[in-house]
Image (cartoon, rainbow, N blue to C red):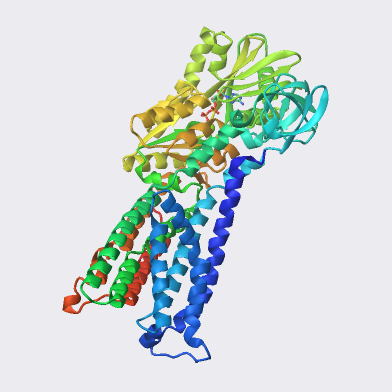
C-alpha cells in the first residue's frame, strides 16, 4: 500500500502550491517592464523609458509569455470546469484574459486601438497571488492526515504455505499471520498469537508509556513495537482498521469546502453568466449599430474585464490567512478553516471535565478499606496497577505512593479501559482499578457503609476509584481535582454571549453535579464512555444545535471530530490535538470566547470583501457596456482595469485591517 490515496493527494497539492508560487513570482517580475513600457501608464505618470530596437514589441513579447506561462493554468482549469458543466471563477478569468490577449495581439499587430498588455499582465499576476495564498491556507490544515498516513509500513512478513513471504500491505487478508520485528511497525489490526513485547501506541491513544502486550492482546495498525518479537493474526485490514477510521474522520472534516468559499464560487458562477451574456449583447448591439468591430470589441473587453472576479479571488483567501495568523498570535492554532468559520454560529459549548474544566491535577484526599487490607496496601496496589498509565488519576496515585515511600509491586498484562479505569495482574491476581462502572461490570456492590461515605465525598466533588481483586472489593480512594480559575470566567463569558454551556465526563453523577454547580453549568452528562461522548454530540446536533466540543484526552477524540467545532486543550494528548479543528495552546478555556469573537470578525470581513469585490460590477458593468455612450460617458478597457485594481486594493486593505484587531472577549 502506497500509504493510501491520501498521501498521493497531498503530494499533488504540494505541487500545486509551489506551482502557483513560482508562476506568481515570475509573472510579477515580467510584468514590471510591461507596465513601464505601456504608453498609457507612461502618459499618466509623464515619464518615458529608453528606446531600444524592438522596444515597441516588448509588451507584446513579455505579455505573451505571461499569458502562456501564468495564464494557461487558469485556462486548463476552466476546461475542467466546463467539462463538469460548472463554469465558475476559472472560466471567467480565462475568458477575460483570453479576450484581452487576443484583442491586444490584434491591436498591436494591426497598430490600431489600445493594446491591454499591462492590464493582462497585472490581471494574471494578481490572480496567481490569490490562488497561491488560498492553496497555502488549505494545505496547512492537512498536515495531520499526512502524519497518520506515514504510520503504516509498506510491506508485511507473513507465513503462507509454511513459508515466510514479504507481501505488499494490500495483499494482507483477514486470518493471515504476520511478524512484527523489534522496533517494527504493526501492519494491520490483529491479535497476538505468539510473543510478548511493549508497544508504543502514543500516536493512537496519546498514552506516552508503551503498553505491555502478550498472547491474545490486540494490536493496532501503525503502532510501533518495542524490544520483543510478535506473531500477529490479522483481524482487520485496510479501511476497517482503527487507523483508517481515524484518518477517515479527519479527512471527512477537512475535505468539506468552507461555506464562504462555496458562496464566493457561486458569486463567480453568476458573474460568469452575467459577463458572458452582457459581453455578447454588448458586442452584438454595438456591431449592429454600425459602430465598427473595433469599438464593439473594446466595449466587450471592458465588460469582461470589469466582470472578472479579480478581487473576488483575493477576498476570501486573504481574510482567511490573516485571521489564521491573528489566531496564532492569540495562542489559537487553527487546523481547519471550517472550524473557525463555524465558531460564530455555535449554540452549545460542551466541555470535558477532567483536564479541561479542571486542571487534572488530582490529590489523594481519603482512602477507604473494605476488608482485611491496610490503607498503605490499597494505595500500593492502586499505584502499581497504574504504573504505565498517563491518566491524571494515575499520576496522582503514583505521586502519593512516592510521598509515602511505598514501593511498587511488579505487574503483568496491563490494560487500559478508557473512560473506566485500568487492570493488571499482581502476584497472579487480577486487579481492577477504576470507576463505579467497574463495580457494575463485575457485579459487586460497594456495601452500605462505604456507600454513604462515597456519596458524601462525591457530593464534595471528589472522584472515587475502586480497587477490586478477583471480584472482591478491597477498598476505594477519594481524589480531589482543582477547578481551573479560568473556567469560571470562560463559562460566564460564554453565557453572556447567549451560548449554552454543558459538561460531559466519564466521572460519576455526584462529582459531575458538584463541578457543574461550582461553575454554574446547568446541563451535564456523567458516566459517559468515550464512544458515547460522540453520540451525545450527535444528539445535540439532531436537536438543531451547532456544537463546540472542548477536550483534552483520547476519550474525547471521537466527540471532537463529530462536533461542528472541535477544540483541544494544547496540553492534552496527541490524538485529541489531531482530532480538533482548533487547539488552545495556552490551555486557557477563556480563549474559547476569543475563538468565537475572531470567527465573527472574520465573517464580517469576508462579507464586506464579497461586497467590495462584486458590488462595483453593478455600477461599472453598464458603463463598460456603453449604456451611457450617448452622453459621452464610456468606460475604456484600461479604465475598467483601473477600477478593478482599485476594488482589489479595497479588498486587500479591508482584509489587512483585521491584522490590527485585539481580541477582547
Ligand atoms: P473525563 O471524561 O472527565 O475526562 P475519563 O473518561 O478520563 O474522565 O475517566 C472517567 C473515570 O474513569 C474517572 O473518573 C475514573 O473513575 C476512571 N478512570 C479512568 N482512568 C483511570 C485510571 N487510570 N485509574 C483509575 N481510574 C480511572
Ligand atoms: Mg479529560
Q: In percent of the image, x 42 and y 63: which residue is there?
A: 94
Q: Position of residue 611 (x, y in %)?
A: 30, 59
Q: Residue at x 42, y 29 (%)?
A: 538
Report whether 639 appears left or right of 587: left
Residue found at the far left of this picture = 631
- Can the viewer see residue 573 in this picture? no
Q: Residue at x 54, y 17 (%)?
A: 436
> Could you tell me if residue 74 is visible in this image?
yes
The percent coordinates of residue 359 (x first, y second) are 53, 37
Q: Position of residue 151 (x, y in %)?
A: 67, 39
**Residue at screen point 47% across, 69% down:** 125
Q: Name the quarter where the N terminus is drawn.
A: top right
Asked whether 158 or 345 is in front, the reply is 158
Q: Foreground: 37 or 418?
A: 37
Q: Position of residue 152 (x, y in %)?
A: 68, 37
- Extreme-right residue of the structure: 163
Q: Please give the count of numbered marks on the rendered protein.
A: 0
Q: Please identify the quarter of the rendering in which residue 425 is found.
A: top right
Question: In the rendered view, would you say 624 is above or below 493?
Answer: below
Amino acid at each position: 500500500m502506497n500509504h493510501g490515496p491520501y498521501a498521493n493527494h497531498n503530494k499533488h497539492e504540494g505541487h500545486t502550491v509551489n506551482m502557483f508560487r513560482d508562476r506568481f513570482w515570475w509573472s510579477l517580475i515580467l510584468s514590471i517592464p510591461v507596465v513601464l513600457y505601456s504608453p498609457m501608464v507612461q502618459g499618466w505618470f509623464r515619464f518615458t523609458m529608453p528606446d531600444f530596437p524592438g522596444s515597441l514589441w516588448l509588451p507584446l513579447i513579455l505579455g505573451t509569455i505571461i499569458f502562456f506561462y501564468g495564464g494557461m493554468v487558469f485556462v486548463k482549469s476552466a476546461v475542467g470546469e466546463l467539462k463538469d458543466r460548472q463554469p465558475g471563477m476559472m472560466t471567467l478569468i480565462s475568458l477575460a484574459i483570453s479576450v484581452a490577449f487576443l484583442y491586444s495581439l490584434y491591436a498591436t499587430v494591426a497598430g490600431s486601438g489600445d493594446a491591454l498588455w499591462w492590464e493582462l499582465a497585472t490581471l494574471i499576476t494578481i490572480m496567481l497571488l490569490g490562488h497561491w495564498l488560498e492553496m497555502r491556507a488549505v494545505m496547512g490544515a492537512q498536515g495531520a492526515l499526512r502524519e497518520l498516513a506515514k504510520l503504516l509500513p509498506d510491506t508485511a512478513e507473513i507465513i503462507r504455505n509454511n513459508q515466510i513471504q514479504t507481501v505488499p500491505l494490500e495483499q494482507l487478508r483477514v486470518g493471515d499471520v504476520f511478524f512484527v520485528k523489534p522496533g517494527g511497525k504493526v501492519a494491520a489490526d490483529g491479535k497476538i498469537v505468539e510473543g510478548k513485547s511493549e508497544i508504543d501506541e502514543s500516536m493512537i491513544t496519546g498514552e506516552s508509556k508503551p503498553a505491555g502486550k502478550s498472547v491474545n492482546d490486540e494490536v493496532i495498525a501503525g503502532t510501533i513495537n518495542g524490544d520483543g518479537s510478535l506473531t500477529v493474526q490479522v483481524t482487520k485490514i485496510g479501511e476497517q482498521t482503527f487507523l483508517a477510521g481515524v484518518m477517515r474522520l479527519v479527512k471527512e472534516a477537512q475535505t468539506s469546502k468552507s461555506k464562504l468559499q462555496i458562496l464566493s464560487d457561486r458569486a463567480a458562477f453568476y458573474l460568469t453568466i452575467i459577463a458572458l451574456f452582457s459581453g455578447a449583447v454588448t458586442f452584438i448591439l454595438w456591431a449592429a449599430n454600425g459602430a465598427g468591430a473595433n469599438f464593439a470589441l473594446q466595449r466587450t473587453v471592458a465588460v469582461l474585464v470589469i466582470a472578472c472576479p479579480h478581487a473576488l479571488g483575493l477576498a476570501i483567501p486573504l481574510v482567511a490567512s490573516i485571521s489564521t495568523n491573528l489566531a496564532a498570535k492569540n495562542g489559537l492554532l487553527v487546523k481547519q478553516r471550517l472550524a473557525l468559520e463555524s465558531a460564530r454560529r455555535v449554540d452549545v459549548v460542551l466541555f470535558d471535565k477532567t483536564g479541561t474544566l479542571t486542571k487534572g491535577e488530582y490529590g489523594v484526599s481519603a482512602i477507604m478499606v473494605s476488608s482485611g487490607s491496610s490503607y498503605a496496601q490499597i494505595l500500593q496496589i492502586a499505584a502499581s496497577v497504574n504504573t504505565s498509565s498517563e491518566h491524571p488519576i494515575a499520576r496522582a496515585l503514583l505521586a502519593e505512593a512516592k510521598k509515602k515511600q511505598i514501593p511498587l509491586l511488579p505487574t503483568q498484562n496491563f490494560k487500559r479501559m478508557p473512560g473506566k479505569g485500568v487492570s493488571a495482574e499482581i502476584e497472579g491476581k487480577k486487579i481492577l482499578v477504576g470507576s463505579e462502572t467497574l463495580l457494575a461490570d463485575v457485579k459487586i456492590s460497594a456495601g452500605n457503609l462505604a456507600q454513604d461515605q462515597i456519596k458524601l465525598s462525591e457530593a464534595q466533588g471528589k472522584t472515587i476509584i475502586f480497587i477490586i481483586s478477583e471480584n472482591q472489593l478491597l477498598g476505594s480512594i477519594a481524589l480531589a481535582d482543582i477547578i481551573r480559575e479560568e473556567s469560571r470566567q470562560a463559562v460566564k463569558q460564554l453565557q453572556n454571549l447567549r451560548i449554552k454551556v454543558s459538561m460531559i465526563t466519564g466521572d460519576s453523577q455526584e462529582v459531575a453535579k458538584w463541578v457543574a454547580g461550582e461553575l454554574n453549568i446547568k446541563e451535564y452528562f456523567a458516566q459517559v464512555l468515550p464512544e458515547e461522548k460522540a453520540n451525545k454530540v450527535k444528539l445535540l446536533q439532531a436537536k438543531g444545535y451547532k456544537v463546540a466540543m472542548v477536550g483534552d484526552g483520547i476519550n474525547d477524540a471521537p466527540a471532537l471530530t463529530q462536533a461542528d467545532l472541535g477544540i483541544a486543550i494544547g496540553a492534552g494528548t496527541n490524538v485529541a490535538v489531531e482530532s480538533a479543528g482548533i487547539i488552545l495552546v495556552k490551555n486557557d478555556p477563556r480563549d474559547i470566547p476569543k475563538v468565537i469573537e475572531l470567527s465573527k470578525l472574520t465573517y464580517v470581513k469576508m462579507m464586506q470583501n464579497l461586497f467590495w469585490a462584486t458590488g462595483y460590477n453593478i455600477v461599472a458593468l453598464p458603463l463598460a457596456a456603453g449604456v451611457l455612450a450617448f452622453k459621452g460617458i464610456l468606460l475604456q478597457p484600461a479604465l475598467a482595469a483601473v477600477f478593478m485594481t482599485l476594488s482589489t486594493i479595497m479588498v486587500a486593505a479591508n482584509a489587512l485591517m483585521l491584522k490590527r484587531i485585539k481580541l477582547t472577549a
